[in-house]
Image: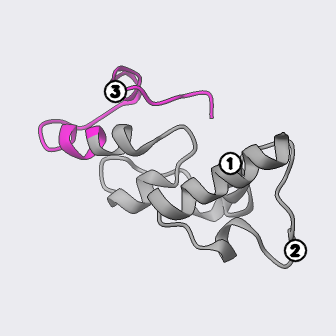
Amino acid sequence: MLRENRLYQSDWLMRFYKFKAEEILSKDQPFLDPDVDPKLAYALRNLQLYPVNVNTADYEMILRVPGIGVQSAQRIIMSRRYQKLNSLHLKKIGVVMKR
């Protein structure tokens, strides 16, 4: 059941978040991690890309942040036209701040 869920999550990342299979799996990590979802595993393997400034980052990079989905990323892009965003704004938008 867990493996099926991880495969579904990976498929979702490739279809809606524009991830490539090589970004989800690597030669060092040829299997999906059963303990963390694929998006978080990607972030942990690419710590040099984080933290992301949501006030200046492009849409594709915002989508790669764990805790930010498609709707939240779209809301961030729309909201930052009017003001600089901080953590309180992100919580109101619906971003999961634990990740």
Amino acid bearing label 1:
Leu
Relative side of 79 to 34, left or right? left
SS for dot 2: loop
Disc 2 designates what residue?
A: 28
- Where is residue 5 shown, x and y percent of the image? 74, 44
Q: Nearer the viewer, residue 62 or 82?
A: 62
The part of the image, by quadrant, that contains residue 82 is top left
Q: Separation of disc 3 and disc 2 at Cα?
A: 36 Å
Relative side of 41 to 60, left or right? right
Q: Nearer the viewer, residue 25 or 81?
A: 25
The part of the image, by quadrant, that contains residue 21 is bottom right
SS for dot 3: helix
Q: Separation of disc 1 and disc 2 at Cα?
A: 16 Å
- Where is residue 98 shown, x and y percent of the image? 62, 27
Dot 2, crowdedness within 10 Å: few (<14), some or many (≥20)?
A: few
Mark number for residue 40? 1
Amino acid bearing label 2:
Asp
Q: Residue at 67% across / 63% down in the picture?
A: 46
- Quarter of the image where the C terminus is located: top right
Disc 3 designates what residue?
A: 93
Identify whether 49 is placed above or below 77. Answer: below
Q: Which residues are magenta?
A: 75-99
Amino acid bearing label 3:
Ile
Queried whether the magenta region covers residue 18, the answer comes back as no
Q: How many marks?
A: 3
Q: Nearer the viewer, residue 51 or 32?
A: 32
Chain-order first, disc 1 or disc 2: 2
Identify whether 36 is placed above or below 90. Answer: below
Identify whether 23 is placed above or below 7. Answer: below
